[in-house]
Amino acid sequence: MNVPAELKYTEEHEWAKVEGNTVTIGITEFAQNELGDIVFVELPQLGDTLQVGEPFGSVESVKTVSELYSPVSGKVIKINEGLSGSPEKVNEAPYGEGWMIQVELSDPSEVEKLWSADKYKETYSE
């Protein structure tokens, strides 16, 4: 299982790349493996305000529909528009071209509550 050490993680299988006050968010390799082939990604609008732990969108796969939960609170400042035409990027490169949104943090202390790569691996390794 690929779990990049520089990222933070949630119990719901989202990852967060923190760069200053900006957080890039996607789903983990584990999550996309569990979901199977992703056929549709629903994301919030630019400017939407997210609350930590609240749903911000969903992914639809051939198996199921799964909600996406925000690892942090803040304002959506960028959306991966490429996923609307190519949702399979989430399967192919969940930590790369399959990223979903970028959020401007409203409460930087929330980052401290996210899981380390080690904790995520310990919790979800087979």
Image: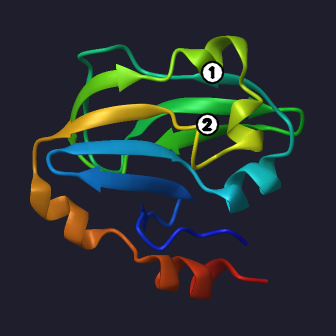
The reply to whether dot 1 and dot 2 touch (C-beta < 8 Å) is yes
Residue 76 falls in image quadrant? top left
Where is 70 relative to 104, above or below?
below
**Residue 42: where, in percent of width, then height?**
57, 21
For the residue carrying disc 1, how many other residues have a C-alpha within 10 Å: few (<14), some (14-19), or many (20+)? many
Q: How is the image coloured?
A: rainbow
Could you say which is closer to the camera, residue 14 or residue 4? 4
Residue 61 falls in image quadrant? top right
For the residue carrying disc 2, how many other residues have a C-alpha within 10 Å: few (<14), some (14-19), or many (20+)? many
- Left or right: residue 53 versus residue 38 is left
Identify the amino acid type marked 1.
Answer: Leu
Could you say which is closer to the camera, residue 66 or residue 123? 123
Residue at 76% in and 41% down: 92
Disc 2, SS: loop
- Which residue does the numbered mark 1 point to in the structure image? 83
Quadrant into which the N terminus falls: bottom right
Residue at 45% in and 63% down: 10
Could you say which is closer to the camera, residue 98 or residue 72? 98
**Residue 112: where, in percent of width, then height?**
21, 71
**Residue 75: where, in percent of width, then height?**
20, 29
Q: Who comes first in sequence, dot 1 or dot 2?
A: 1
- Left or right: residue 114 versus residue 14 is left
- Which residue does the numbered mark 2 point to in the structure image? 98
Residue 70 falls in image quadrant? top left
